[in-house]
Image (cartoon, rainbow, N blue to C red):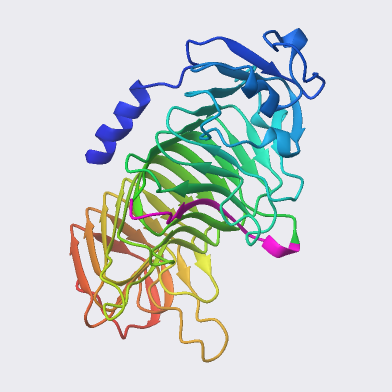
Amino acid sequence: MRCLVTALALCISLFESSLGASVYISPLGKDAGECDDSSTACRTLAYAVKHAKDEDNIRVMPGVYSGVGNFIDFTATSVPKNLTLVAHETTTSPRSYTFNALGEYAVMRLGTGNKVQGIGFTGVRSQTTASMGIMWLAGSAEVRDCEFWDNGKSIGITGNAATTQVQIHSTKFDLPCSDKTCSSGVGIDFLRQSSYSPVVDATDLRFSGTGTGIRISVGTLRVFGIAATGLTTVFNGGESSYGDFELEVTNGHFKNNSRVFYAYGFDPKLYHYTGRARFEKCVFEEGHCDACDGPAIRAGKRITVAVTTSTFSDNRAGEGKSGAKMGHGGAIYCDDTATINIDESTFTDNKAVDGSPAWCHAHCGFVATKAQLSGNTADKDTGRCPW
């Protein structure tokens, strides 16, 4: 219910261009004059910002924008406050208004009051040289109706402001990266910059390709409406051990992914952190991996997962190469000291080498209420869960 209330509140507060004046940019423009009309557009974003005032809209004409002058830090003290970067025609595909890093390290940084709508971002190849992503978001930055593709990493969420509460809505991520250094990308990555924990509210996200959709190592993510297909991992929780994390997902549709939620967990001898995830009204289907445990949900030490009114069907956990000792849990794997609560959910035709639809460690806290099971099969069942 909390997810639903949050999402409805976000939907009521629809994205609109600010009430300020407009400054125009175009690949065919010229960095001269005031750029206050589409016929006299600037050529670069950096020049346009110099002629903008607080609350202004920077309107992007169709074309491709590249080079240092088109990737700027909107949070810099010299930049007017609360600027909005918006496609001239927001009903057109974001790829018609593309900011291309051309394989180099280039970042557009947005902070409190900054908004971006209807723009495409591509071309940051290496996850090493672009570990922060092609876009950084902090403060109350908002992204809507955008598209990210062919990036080593797309969005980096920074927690270097106590009030970091980012919004991302109706945005697509195509994760494969064409460069051999990042054959699979990361869509959204929560980055540790300070002691603060960022909060992100998102609606209507779309992920495709290979790679990791969202990596949350600290902070809170609330998602209402998400679809992911073909990913290696949709949600990777706590991988970098930066702090506590919390994930809430409502109305998710996950199909043909190797893993949906993967949280290896925190060793209590090394970390005091915890991770929490909640999935409500979600569909996990055709999650097939040749060597994994629990293709839908894998929870490790100090991880708590709650699932309600969701469906798991035709998921399969494979053993991998001889001696890999995987293939546990056709849909769910509950590891040592993890806690998983299932309520009013359906499990159909999930398969595993060992334990289906779920496999439970002896010290796992697994509780299922009103679960419906049918057609789930496994060669053996060494980790029987208390259905």
Residue range (magenta): 180-196
Classify 119 as above or below 209. Answer: above
Q: What residue is at 28 percent from the left and 40 percent from the top? A: 3
Q: What residue is at 60 percent from the left and 37 percent from the top? A: 147
Q: Is residue 372 visible?
A: yes
Classify 205 as above or below 142. Answer: below
The quadrant in which residue 27 appears is: top right
Q: Residue 318 location, x and y as percent?
A: 50, 76
Looking at the rendered image, the quarter that the N terminus falls into is top left
Q: Residue 301 location, x and y as percent?
A: 29, 74
Q: Residue 141 location, x and y as percent?
A: 45, 33
How many numbered markers are drawn?
0
Question: Is 194 or 340 nearer to us in this picture?
Answer: 194
Q: Is residue 377 magenta?
A: no
User: Does residue 68 appear to the left or right of 224 in the view shown?
Assistant: right
User: Does residue 198 appear to the left or right of 233 in the view shown?
Assistant: left
Looking at the rendered image, the quarter that the C terminus falls into is bottom left
